[in-house]
Each structure stands twice: as structure tokens, then as C-alpha cells.
Image (tube, rainbow, N blue to C red):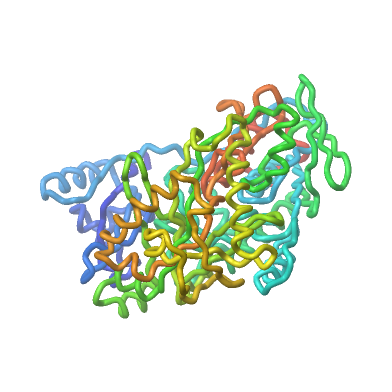
Amino acid sequence: MADRVPLRVSQFQVPVEEPEDGLPEQVAEALGLTPGDLLHWRVVRKALDVRDKQNLRFVYTLEIETTAEAAEHAQQWVELTGSPLVVAVRSEPPFCMPPPGSQPLGSRPVVVGSGPAGLVCAYFLALHGYAPLVLERGAPVQERIRHVRAFDAGGPLHPESNYLFGEGGAGTFSDGKLTCRNFGPDALRVLELLAECKGQQPGKPNILYYHRPHLGSNRLPAVVKALRQRIERLGGEVRFYTRVEDLHFDSGGIRGLSTSSGYLPAQVVVLAIGHSARDTFRMLARRGVPLSPKPFQFGVRVEHPQELVNAVQYGPRQDYYVQKLGNADYSLIVNDSRWPLYSFCMCAGGYIIPSVSAPGYFCTNGMSLSRRDSPYANSGLVTTLPVSAFGGSTALAGVELQERYEARAFELGGGADYRCPAQLARDFLQQRRSARLPSSSYPRGLTSAELREVLPPLVITALEKGLRVMDRYWRGRFLPEALLVGPEARGSSPLRIDRDPQTRQSPGVPGLYPVGEGAGYAGGIVSAAVDGLRTARAIIATYAPLQVPAAVG
């Protein structure tokens, strides 16, 4: 119909008890329309508002299609009635991929890394007939799970198959949060792809629109495996235990790669290596690939009893809301221009895990399973370290800073036992080692330590200021039971692999496409996947496919 008008309706609030299938009638009434006026509707975003503890509400953003006459009436109705709703005509372009380019490919594109950026890039290349080859230094995800479980149980660290290396990348064992600030069609297409790959949680909010969608570290492996199988069915190939050791290029661009399994010719290389591939960073620096230091997150992880978080967030009706909504999460920000501190990767009903990729270093992270039913809640508490705090002038200065503090944390934790340095928050503020430590979700045990030894001065100052502010936010309930562990240093990449914003290629190295978190262009599963999708789009627009595309879209 030519007169269909797309509208975006924001700030639509509904009590959590209301079933979602009643939204069309409720939205129509709020806009002064009838349900029949809504020719199409979908939820764009759904967030939980916990400010009124007696009446928790979901806040929706929706997209609807209606006639031009009804759209005009709805906008006038909202204005006349003084409604808090925000109604605007939506003018967002649909998702699309470009027609294929004409430049011939002498060999299939190589994607280095099978995290979200690499897998999604490879999927769209395969879908459009480019038969990509994916190189993963670690193990297939099911084998990787066995290695991680053995490590948690006290076994040795597997250097190529651990919490950070292996199929799915670091995100596979860091909670499965699909948070993304981007409302656009690329982000929606990525979420649709994850949903298609068994990403839906039965009975849980839809990952396509929930404000902080969460799959859980037990569900992500199935999604990762399903995505890899799609790539293979479409003509792509994935090789495991294949580490890239060198790049070969000249003034004309990429010529090939040396790997742990031999040499590979390549004209197009997508570098989706993740932010912990420090050996690859050093190789790139030696080879003269343009790199720049960039600010990154550094801090600690804080753990509380989940019951306390439920009480703070849900109030006196906590038992009812826990049964209705599950364990509560939180988001805390101390907006101090000099010493900002904010929560990061909050894991309700979760576990503290060792974010370790090489012997001799120790770092923390957090994860939750899909049911979020651990008796503990944990979150990163981080600040952003500026380049000026790195103590060096090279592109690798941030990496070297991470290594210094992670090596000290390894020593404080007892070396190869991989025990976690820990300190009660109140003891941290009083600059004293904790005489006792509470029980914790960390699987290999805690060691009482002075965490100031594993933190840069700027981070220490941010914690000294910010912890007290967060305690005021929770009316004195944040500090008494807060356990700090650390360091937390792998939240983002400490460097950027430079690229041209239009071509998405490395300047001076045609054919090299840095993508994702490790390259410094993303900050989570969805944003990394979107970055991979956009690089696939750039490659498709330049080169001719190697085979007949399986589909268009």
C-alpha cells in the first residue's frame, strides 16, 4: 500500500505482569487508534525500569506501520493528551548487501579468527559465493569446552584452547550478552542470524529486542557451532589449530600467510584475531603494519551475594519479582570527569572466571549460564585508561602494561595454581590485606592480596572515589559484602590496527582488513559481529565471487 507510514513509538510503559501479546491493543489505545489501524508492528527494544520498587515496568520502543491518516492522528493525539510517548516517522533504510564487484580473486578470502567478527564476516562471504577459509588457532567449541572445564577443575592451561582462544572467541565464555547501542538494520540482521542459529531462549525475552539480551555461556557454543556449519554448507572451510605466524605482502598488497600448518597464498585477509592475540600484535608490529595505541578498560571484578542484588533492585517484593523475572542485574556509573568508574559485563547469578590465554599471567572476567542461578552476582568495575597512562610511546605500550600487572597477579595468586587475588572492598579502601575472605564463585580458590599491587595508579584512584559513590547509590549496602578480585584488564583492546574508514583496509597493505575487538573497532559480541558484516560488504562490493551465491540478503 502506497500510503503506509512507518512510525517509531518510544517510552511505552507496561507493568511487568502484563502479557506481551496484548501490546497491539495497548499501543493502539495509547495512540488514539484501533488495533485494526496497526498494519504491522514489532518490538525494537524492551528494558526493565526498577525505579519504583512496588511497580516494576517494562519500557518498550516499537515500530508500527499504519495509514498516513492514522499516523497524523496518532501524532496529534500524543501532543493533545500530553502523553509521555515519543512518536516519530521512521526513515531507516532496510538491510541490504551490495551487488558483487568485478575485481577477480586469485584465491579465496582468508578470515583469521572465529570470534563473532570473523564468523559473521565469513558467513556473509560464504552466502554470497566467496568460499572463505577461516583459520582458528584454537579448538572446535565442543573440544574447547572440555579443556576449559579441565582447567577450572585444577588442570593445566591449554595454550591454544582456553577461555580466550578457540572457536567462538573470548565471548563464548563471557556470559553471552548481546547488548548493542546500535538500533540499525545491520545490528538487527546480526541478531536475526544468532536467533536462527538456536539463539532463542524459550520463555525468555526475545534476543532481537531485549535491552540487555543474554544467551548464557552454556547456550553460546551451540550458536557458534551452528554458524560454523552454515559457513561450511555454503562452501566455506574452517581449519582449527592453525595459528597465523607471519604475513607476506609487498607494495601491491597481501600475498600470503605463514601458519603453524604451512604457507597459504592470499589476496584478501580479514584479521579478526581478538584482543588477546598478543603474539600476533607483535608480529604485525615487526612487519610494519600500521598500529596505534588506544585507551582501554582496566579495573577489578566485584562480587556480591545475589540475594543482596535482588533486594536492592527489586525492593520489598523481591521474592515475587525473582520468580517473575529471574535474578536481578544492575548498571552503575560514577560520572566523574577525572575518575570515572562504571560497571561492565554484569553477571547476575554468575561466576568469576580466569581470563587467561598464556602461562605466567592472570586476569579475571565473569560469566553466567542461561538460568542465572548461581548464588553470586559479579560485575567488572572499570575505568578507561588513556594512552598517556601507559608509560610508553609504542603501539604495544598498552599490551605491555597489561602484561606487567597480569604477571604480578599471577605471582600473588600462587603461580600455576591460578588462585585469584582477592580483597574485601572495605579493606581495599583501608589499604589492608583481608584477614578473611567470603565464599566465592571463582572455581580455583582465592588468595588474600593487596589489589593495589595489580592496578595502575589511575585505576586505584577511580576505585577509591567510585566505590564510596556506588555505596551511596545503594544506600550503604554496596560496600559491606563486596568482594574485589582482579585485575580485570581484557575488556577492550589496548591498540588499534589502523584501517581506512572507506575501504576498511589497512593503509599501505591493500587486501588486509582488520575487524572486531582485537583490531580496536568493537566492544562486544554484537558490535564485533556488525563490524565483520560491514567488512564482508566491502569485500563483496570490490571482488567478483568465486562460485554461484547461495542466496541474496
Residue 179 vs residue 131, the one in the foreground: 179
Tally of marks: 0
Q: Where is residue 551? Give x, y as percent.
A: 66, 45
On the rendered image, what quadrant is the C terminus found in? Answer: top right
Q: Residue at x 37, y 71 (%)?
A: 481
Q: Which of 525 and 477 is in front in this view?
A: 477
Q: Where is residue 71 in the image (x, y as percent from the top left)?
A: 25, 44
245 sits left or right of 410 in the view: right
Q: Residue at x 61, y 71 (%)?
A: 444
Horizontal side of residue 385 vs 60, given as left or right: right
- The residue sitting at the right extreme is 262
In the image, taking residue 134 as reference, residue 335 lies left or right, namely left
Q: Looking at the picture, how far across and down is residue 477, in whole percent? A: 30, 68
Horizontal and vertical percent position of residue 30: 20, 56
Q: Residue 384's image quarter? A: top left
Q: Residue at x 54, y 46 (%)?
A: 492
Q: Nearer the viewer, residue 308 or 261?
A: 308
Q: Say whether residue 208 is visible.
A: no
Q: Is residue 524 above or below residue 502?
A: below
For image coordinates 78% across by 43% down, the residue present is: 244
Looking at the rendering, in which quadrant would you find the N terminus?
top left
- Give left or right: position of 242 versus 184: right
Is any part of residue 152 visible from this angle? Answer: yes
Residue 26 vs residue 461, the one in the foreground: 461
